[in-house]
Amino acid sequence: MLDFLRLRVLDAVARHGSVTAAARELHYSQPSVSHHLARLEAETGARLVQRTGRGIRLTEAGRLLADRAAEILGRVEAAAGELAAHTGLRAGRVRLAAFPSALGSFVPAAAARLARDHPGVEVRLVDAEPPEALAMLRAGQVDVAVTFRHTVLPATDEGVRLTPLLADPGHLVVPAPGTPAQGSSTGRRTGNARHVGAAPEAPAVQKTRTAAPITQKSQTAGGTPGTRAGDGAYDGPPGGLAAYRESRWIVGCERCRAQAFALCAEAGFTPSVAFITDDYVAVQAMVAAGLGVALLPELALTAHRRPDVATYRIPGATRAIFAATYGEPPDPPATTALLAALTTATTR
């Protein structure tokens, strides 16, 4: 194995054609340079330099080795520069997988903050539900996965490190009062009127209010049933979920609908499923049209909120949102910076 420092000496001698100049550049003494050249000749078994009066020139073998030494030194210096840029966040790449309502709410703000603070770091975003995102994380296809866990579901994140981001309350979504869907025949029968479960009459401003950004205050369920929450929702529908036992329900995939089914079971009934979709825009359109009621997370209402639907915050329907990473700590600098940006974007 050739000694790296001796290759540096040979490179300096080749460029300057002088032991004195090479010693000056390397901050070595002239005898030290001559010693390194002699040792390198012993290692290679070839004559590398030939003295000519006051100067020195390379032999054919010396020129061949010097050319390769220059290539090696160039690559090492390039690698050192790239590593310094990476650790200093002047360059790099970080990949994030997140579910749709996260991509439609806080993830863009986090990505924009990272790009602003570290413009040399490239951020790549992938749309993926938690199971797919975690699989991509374990396979090394992404660096961070934004995922969620319902309180009624078992933990499935063994081997993955989780950074808590926020608690995302669930909301019952119904047609807004005063809309045509309030009298739809798809709902339950109460007295002489048929309803899909419209919200109680609210001030006129409620009809046009959209969900406000998630705040720490709005991340916990509570309040008095029938009163407006800070984001324009109502906490706890009168009569609870049991009041919607005869309504038709719009639910999501098997994983997401498990929470709705569990909450309805606690209220003493099994929901009658009319439609199945994970598209929260489509869910609100169906509710507004009077096709049923639904349970949506607050993030979905933050990303998109129709003025012709009303919402009740449902105690116990909260899901926990995490940023997941994989492997032994510490995380790479770009990953750590992205986690910090996600935390900032969800703490307002």
Image: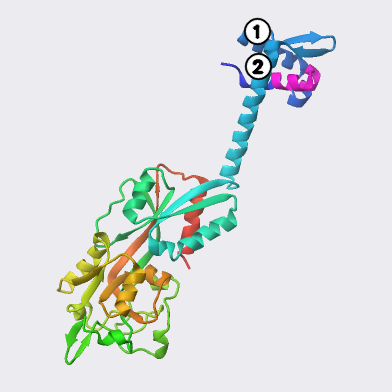
Q: Nearer the viewer, residue 186 or 202?
A: 186
In the rendered structure, does residue 167 fall within the stretch colored magenta? no
Q: Is residue 213 left or right of residue 249?
A: right
Residue 120: give its label: none
Disc 1 packing (10 Å; few <14; some 14–19; many ≥20) = few
Name the residue rendered at 43%, 43% in the picture: 329
Q: Is residue 25 above or below residue 296?
A: above
Disc 2 packing (10 Å; few <14; some 14–19; many ≥20) = some
Amino acid type for the residue under numbered disc 1: Ala
- Find residue 102 and report its image quarter: bottom left
Q: Is residue 206 above or below residue 277?
A: below
Disc 1 target residue = 46
Q: Is residue 101 left or right of residue 315?
A: right
Disc 2 target residue = 65
Mark 1 vs 2: CB contact within 8 A: yes
Q: Is residue 276 left or right of residue 234?
A: left
Name the residue rendered at 44%, 75% in the picture: 212
Amino acid type for the residue under numbered disc 2: Leu
Question: Residue 86, position in %: x, y?
Answer: 57, 43
Q: Nearer the viewer, residue 168 or 283?
A: 283
Measure the alpha-carbon separation of dots 1 and 2. 10 Å
- Please give the count of numbered marks on the rendered protein: 2
Question: Residue 51, position in %: x, y?
Answer: 79, 9
Start-end of magenta stretch = 10-22
Name the residue rendered at 34%, 66% in the picture: 279
Question: Residue 80, position in %: x, y?
Answer: 61, 35
